[in-house]
Amino acid sequence: MLLAAGLTTMEVIEAGTRHSAYVCGQCGELGTLEPGMLAGVVVVDGDPLESLQAMRGNLRPLTYDFQATRFLAALRSSVPGSR
């Protein structure tokens, strides 16, 4: 529906994350993946910015919530050559 209304795929994703957190009064704690924020992350096959269909039926949620700071640090340490 949102795509049909003219939103981009990024705007649709933000509607379900950043903007939803704002509406719920939680924009200082939830809604974005950045240091200090709480996050629930899903991993998908494909690029949801190219097609939201990448998220349909392919969601594999991580089983716990965590602070993005710890996730980003672990991710960086797992990539060869990154700090």
Image: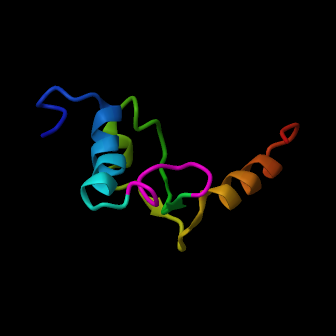
**Coloring scheme used:** rainbow
Q: Which corner quadrant of the image does residue 14 belong to?
A: top left
> Residue 21: within the magenta?
no
* Residue 21 screen position, x and y as percent: 33, 56
Tell me which residue sits at (41%, 53%) in the image. 31
Tell me which residue sits at (27%, 61%) in the image. 24
Tell me which residue sits at (46%, 36%) in the image. 47
Quarter of the image with the N terminus is top left
Say left or right for 83 vs 7: right
Say left or right for 4 vs 15: left
> Residue 60, relative to residue 34: is it above or below?
below
Between 58 and 43, the one lying in front of the other is 43
Quarter of the image with the C terminus is top right
> Residue 31: within the magenta?
yes
> Residue 10, relative to residue 83: is it above or below?
above
* Residue 54 screen position, x and y as percent: 38, 42
Say left or right for 68 vs 44: right
First to last magenta residue range: 27-36
Outermost residue, bottom side: 64
Outermost residue, right side: 81
Between 23 and 63, the one lying in front of the other is 23
> Residue 7, relative to residue 17: is it above or below?
above
| Secondary structure character of the magenta stretch overall | loop
* Residue 45 screen position, x and y as percent: 49, 45
Between 24 and 44, the one lying in front of the other is 24
Tell me which residue sits at (67%, 56%) in the image. 69
Counting labels gives 0
* Residue 26 screen position, x and y as percent: 36, 61
Q: Which corner quadrant of the image does residue 79 belong to?
A: top right
